Image (cartoon, helix red, strand yellow):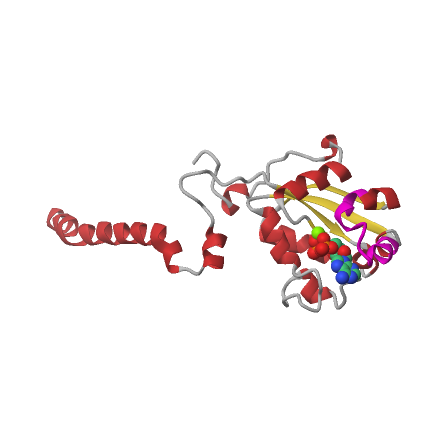
Amino acid sequence: MLQRLCIFQRVVQPFIWRHQETTKRLVPGLPTALPDGLRAAGHRSGSSSPNVTERTLIAVKPDGVQRRLVGQIIRRFEQRGFKLVGLKMLQVSEDLLAQHYCELRTKPFYPSLQQYMTSGPVVIMVWEGYNVVRTSRTMVGHTNPAEAQAGTVRGDFGIHVSRNVVHASDSLEGAQREIKLWFQGKDLLKWDCCDQTSTCEDEES
Ligand code: DAT
Ligand code: MG
């Protein structure tokens, strides 16, 4: 038995250690072997902790509510691993919409956008998680569903830019502004999700 242990220590264990070392060296080296897009998706830069409390605003627009797509859209975000921290259904006023789309108010399509967005209830949500702003834009897809990739919400459920089913904030700053516009702080919940450490490492570790 002792002899077998010695053989293990002399022959097998160094091999395992070498293999572990190689793996460690390969993993940090991985980004250099990937194209830009994939490298960015990997994302941990240096030793900084992942920001798991990033938030974004997602809305199911009136066409999405009318077509009973709310459940399917929520499911995609849950499935991806994001955490729902705020949710409400409302009929949007022209004034609130104008604040939300302040940059688009002078566009020729704004009157029809306003007519559509105030035509029925919308479901507004705040989702939280690592890189949620950018990831949710990817999940939602191109503004024009005709250009959106299959597998994205707009690519799977939309056909025309005038009815593109969902809204997703396009930047961190935009998300912060929009969340403040649609929600009061007290309506956003801070809660621990039981699978949190399975979807992203702890901030402390
Ligand atoms: P996104 O919703 O992808 O952030 P955006 O902010 O440029 O796109 O525009 C907001 C919404 O306005 C968009 O979801 C649908 C509508 N919209 C944009 N461009 C349009 C166009 N050319 N014609 C009609 N509606 C348009
Ligand atoms: Mg936008």
Which residue: 77% across, 44% down? 100
Q: Quadrant of residue 85?
A: top right
Q: Number of marks in the image? A: 0
Left or right of 30, for residue 200 = right
Can you see residue 69?
Answer: no
Which residue: 55% across, 40% down? 52
Left or right of 94, for residue 22 = left
Q: Position of residue 46 (x, y in %)?
A: 40, 42
Q: Which residues are magenta?
A: 99-115
Towards the viewer: 102 or 127: 102
Which residue: 70% across, 69% down? 146
Is 8 rendered above or below residue 188? below
Q: Position of residue 72 (x, y in %)?
A: 71, 58
Is 37 rendered above or below residue 95? below
Is 192 rendered above or below residue 116? above
Can you see residue 22?
Answer: yes
Left or right of 128, for residue 49 = left
Q: Residue furthest left?
A: 3
Magenta span: predominant SS is helix
Question: Is 113 contained in the magenta span?
Answer: yes
Which residue: 48% across, 53% down? 40
Left or right of 43, for residue 142 = right
Towards the viewer: 37 or 122: 37
Question: Is 112 contained in the magenta span?
Answer: yes
Q: Quadrant of residue 96?
A: top right
Q: Position of residue 158 (x, y in %)?
A: 74, 65
Work out which quarter of the rendered image holds the C terminus and state it: top left
Q: Position of residue 109 (x, y in %)?
A: 82, 58
